[in-house]
Amino acid sequence: MDDLSADEIREYRGTLTKPGKNSPHRDRAVAENLDLFERMKNGEFPDGSRVLRAKIDMASPNINFRDPVMYRILHAEHPRTGDKWRIYPMYDWAHGQSDSIEGITHSICTLEFENNRPLYNWFLDQLGVYHPKQIEFARLNLTHTIMSKRKLLRLVKERHVNGWDDPRMPTLRGLRRRGYTAAAIRKFADMIGVAKANSMVDLGMLEYAIREDLNACAPRAMGVLRPLKITIENYPEGMVEEFEVPTHPQDKENREMRVVPFSREIFVEQSDFMEDAPGKFRRLTLGREVRLLGAYYVTCTDVVKDDDGNVVELRCEYDPESRGGQSPDGRKVKGTIHWVSAQHAVQAEVRLYDVLFTDENPEADGDFIENLNPNSLEVIENAMLEPGLAEARPGDHVQFMRQGYFVVDSVDSKPGKPVFNQTVSLRDSWKKMQQK
């Protein structure tokens, strides 16, 4: 039993190049040690006043063997034992015993515990109990995120995120709520393998794994996230048509079709219209004809703006002969955009996620909090979705065509008020051209 303070213990321990020196309390009698330990356990002494140390070798070249601390005093309520024990074990002392009791065969640790392995083995050998094997490997580090539980706890406590299951968090709960599947995480683990050297894995590899998994199984649907109204002026008022479109177009063997309604007023994405469009822009602009996916060819004939000059509506005309997205004369239309019937649309909240940190390595310099991305979450409250999505249930996956993969939120989504979390985006060819 040692009465030295934490600072004194640190001073007595020495350095990697300088051996330590014995504590003045090192040679206490066994009976005195047992008495002090019992009283320490019962809460007789204040926090930090005494510790129990293993008597090994203060001159050992491995600094972990210089009489390591086994128990320290902590007056705290334990969830199982309450206040019966006022002492708590240190990691190196408890680690091997926990593994032994639980029958662990291989205790997998990160590289910083390599120097602790001899002490792990020493404690188990002295106790004469079942001896697991500790193996170290490189910690998984992902770009634009952190994996330290201590630092993730800070994000939660300081409310930089909305709890441990926030879809921006690299926790299993967060990944599940964001729509990541177990199969995708396993594929990602297989791709990166196990290494003995620390490295940084590109977040894009994890995103690739979930895209591959969801591409094979997620049904397709049309969702307009930032709606722009179109009125098709030559389409009969009050008329509603139905179009069959494939639910799994990526699967040539799955012929499942879904029915979507079409009417005179529809919504398209705001980004699918440009008033002064460059030549390579294949979407809507004045005088240009585009294909409404699975429906008709339409041509923009007029633009309606508000008092501030913002585009609030497009007037178009459609070609009745182009039903299904093809015309009898075989003319080519290069642009195809998705849409939703305004009369039948389901309004939903959609949450778009970006990386949690702007810097690839948030911990490289200074406080990692300073690298938080202020735009990591965007909430869209009035997205318009095709009516079939009104029946989507929490956990259901879907690909919003031309947008990305989404999942129905397991916490906030309610019947009639769906909430969709973006799992991962699709790659945007036009955005890439703009960046070039």
Image (cartoon, rainbow, N blue to C red):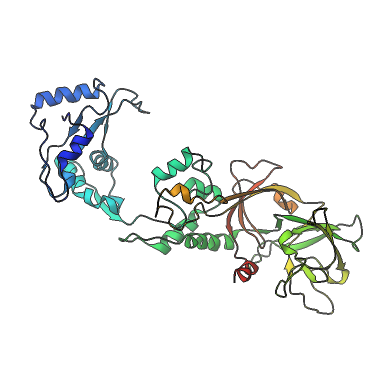
Q: Is residue 213 left or right of residue 65?
A: right
Residue 157, horizontal then vertical, whole percent:
47, 38
Could one spot residue 170 in this view of the protein?
A: no
Quarter of the figure with residue 21: top left
Locate the C terminus by quadrant.
bottom right
Q: Is residue 176 above or below residue 295?
A: above
Residue 134, horizontal then vertical, whole percent:
25, 51
Locate the N terminus by quadrant.
top left
Residue drawn where x is 15% and y is 44% of the image: 14
Q: Is residue 384 left or right of residue 128?
A: right
Residue drawn where x is 80% and y is 79% of the image: 331
User: Camera-side residue: 139 or 58?
Assistant: 58
Residue drawn where x is 89% and y is 62% of the image: 235
Q: Is residue 63 above or below residue 55?
A: below
Residue 232, horizontal then vertical, whole percent:
86, 61
User: Camera-side residue: 41 or 57?
Assistant: 57
Could one spot residue 12 in this view of the protein?
A: yes
Which residue occupies the extreme front position in the image? Answer: 308
Residue drawn where x is 74% and y is 74% of the image: 334
Which residue occupies the extreme top position in the image? Answer: 44
Quarter of the figure with residue 192: bottom left
Q: Is residue 318 left or right of residue 47?
A: right
Residue 355, horizontal then vertical, whole percent:
52, 54
Q: Is residue 119 above or below residue 319?
A: above
